[in-house]
Amino acid sequence: MLYISPMDTTFPEFAPGSVWLVGAGPGDPGLLTLLALHALKSADYVVHDALVDPRIVAMAAPGAVVESMGKRGGQASPRQAEITARLLELARAGKRVLRLKGGDPFVFGRGAEEALALADSGIPFRVVPGVTAGVGGLAYAGIPTTARDCNSSIAFVTGHGQDGEVPAGFDWDGLARGAQVLVFYMALRQLDKVVARLLAAGRKPDEPAAIVSKAATPRQAVLESTLSRIVDDLAAHPMEPPAMLVVGGVVALRRHLSWWSPG
C-alpha cells in the first residue's frame, strides 16, 4: 500500500489546532485523493460519518483516535450541532482533527455548515474535495454522468429535506425540463413521491431509470428500470441505503459500460 509520511513536504502541514474537512469518496479506498491519505496519516483524531468505508477508516495512523459520528436516517444518531461542537472542542485542545465524510464534503455533506462554524470560531480549516457518489458511484455502476449523444446537462438533487419529506420549494416543472439527466441522492425514502412529481412535470414514463445502492463498495447493487416502473420494481427487489436514483438516457448505456463487479 502507498505510504505517505506525515513529514512529507510535498503536502501541506496538518497543523495542531486545525480541522480538515475531507471527502472519502463513495466507497472504494482507491478513490481517495493523495491529500486525503496524507490527512489520514497525520491526524490525531478522525471523526468520521457513517458512509465512510471501514477500509478507509482503517488507514488512520497508529495512535490516532477514531470516533464515529455518523448520522443515519431512522436510527439514533448524533445531531449536527453535537458533531460541530466536538470538532471545535478537539481543535481548541490543540489536536489535528480530520473530519472524514463520505463522497465530497460540499455535496450534500453538510460540510459547509461545519466550515462556517469553524470560521466563526476562528479555527483554521482546510477542505479536501472528494469524489462525489453522483459521479464516482455512477461510474462504478457503468452509468456515465454525461455522454455525447445523451445529454449536455445534469442536475444533482437531494431526495429529501431536513424533515425527511420531499424537499419543499422545488420547481418540479423547471427541474424536469431543465436537465436531461437527474441524479437524486438519498433517494429511497421518498422515491414514490419523487417519481410521481417527475411524471406529473412531463418526464416520459418509459425514460430509463436506475437505483444504485452502496455504490463503489463490495455490496453495490443496481436496479435498472424505467421511470414509471421503478417504484414497483424496487418493491419487488428491495435495496438498502445509501442509494441514488438516476433518470435519463445515460442509464441505457449501462448494458455496454458495466465494467465493475463488486466483491
Image: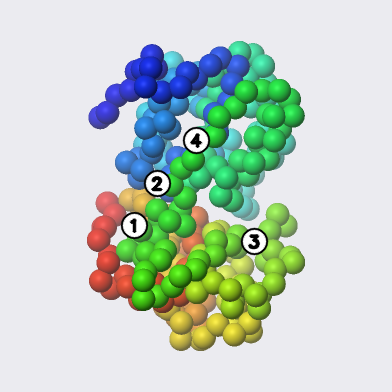
For residue 158, say whether it is visible: yes
Residues at marks 2 and 1 touching, judged by CB atoms closer than 8 Å: yes
For label 4, the residue is: 128
Q: Which comes before the other along the chain, label 4 or label 2?
A: 2
Residues at marks 4 and 1 touching, judged by CB atoms closer than 8 Å: no
Q: CA distance from mark 2 to mark 3?
A: 22 Å
Along the line of sight, which residue is nearer the eye, 193 or 158?
A: 158
Tell me the crowding category of disc 1: few under 14, some 14 to 19, or many 20 or more residues within 10 angstroms, Cα based.
many
The residue at the point 27 percent across, 51 percent down is 263
Q: Position of residue 147 (x, y in %)?
A: 37, 69
Q: Amino acid at mark 4?
A: Val
Tell me the crowding category of disc 4: few under 14, some 14 to 19, or many 20 or more residues within 10 angstroms, Cα based.
some
For label 2, the residue is: 27
Q: Amino acid at mark 1?
A: Tyr
Q: Is residue 89 left or right of residue 176?
A: right
Q: CA distance from mark 4 to mark 2?
A: 16 Å
Marks 4, 1: nearer the viewer:
4
Q: Position of residue 76 (x, y in %)?
A: 64, 44
For label 3, the residue is: 160
Q: CA distance from mark 3 to mark 1?
A: 24 Å
The residue at the point 67 percent across, 16 percent down is 92
